[in-house]
């Protein structure tokens, strides 16, 4: 996979957007669900004004099989190219952090796998 391909995809996320209040790290481990109802969301340490698509992308990162359900529940227009762009941008940013902190970004399901899916 050429390096420039992931960078080109990621650039789509760097577009003008209307700021909203975002969680900033909305991942499955931070969401509590009972049956089909969200009962709580924890770890708001990265909450700030941001792009709503970033939270949706973070929530579905590595779980593309749930993207349709998340979008259906979101209830407004969602640009799939922007979601994919945030997947790439976040993965590109996280590879270095993971390596520096002793994690393997090439482990199955991690950031390198996410970037590879974007090349398809």
Image (spheres, grey):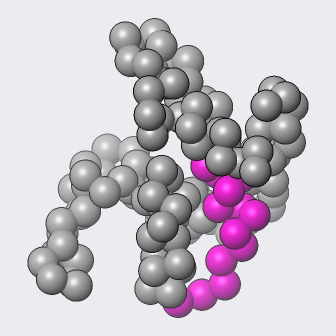
Residue depicted at x 48% and y 67%? 65
Image side of residue 86 versus residue 33, left or right: right
Residue 73 showing in the rendered view:
yes
User: Farthest residue in the left direction?
Assistant: 34
Residue depicted at x 72% and y 61%? 82
Residue 7 showing in the rendered view:
no
Image side of residue 43 versus residue 111, left or right: left
Residue 53 percent location from the top left of the image: 60, 64
In this rendering, the count of numbered labels is 0
Decide whether the magenta segment is chiefly helix, strand or loop. helix
Q: Is residue 103 magenta?
A: no
Quarter holding residue 31: bottom left
- Residue 5 vs residue 92, the one in the foreground: 5
Residue depicted at x 44% and y 34%? 108
Quarter holding residue 92: top right
Q: Quadrant of the N terminus?
A: top right
Up-down relation of residue 8 to residue 33 (above or below) = above
Up-down relation of residue 34 to residue 52 (above or below) = below
Span highlighted in magenta in the image: 75-87
Q: Is residue 79 magenta?
A: yes
Residue depicted at x 21% and y 83%? 37
Image side of residue 14 versus residue 107, left or right: right
Residue 117 percent location from the top left of the image: 65, 47
Residue 45 percent location from the top left of the image: 31, 44
Quarter holding residue 73: bottom left
Residue 47 percent location from the top left of the image: 40, 52
């Amino acid at each position: 996979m050429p390096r420039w391909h992931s960078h080109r995809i990621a650039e789509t996320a760097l577009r003008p957007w209307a700021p909203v209040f975002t969680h900033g790290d909305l991942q499955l481990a931070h969401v509590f669900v009972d049956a089909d109802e969200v009962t709580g969301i924890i770890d708001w340490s990265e909450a700030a004004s941001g792009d709503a698509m970033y939270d949706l992308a973070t929530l579905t990162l590595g779980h593309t099989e749930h993207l349709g359900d998340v979008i259906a529940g979101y209830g407004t227009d969602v640009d799939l190219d922007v979601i994919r762009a945030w997947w790439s941008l976040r993965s590109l940013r996280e590879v270095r952090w993971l390596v520096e902190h002793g994690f393997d970004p090439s482990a199955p399901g991690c950031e390198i796998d996410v970037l590879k899916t974007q090349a398809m």
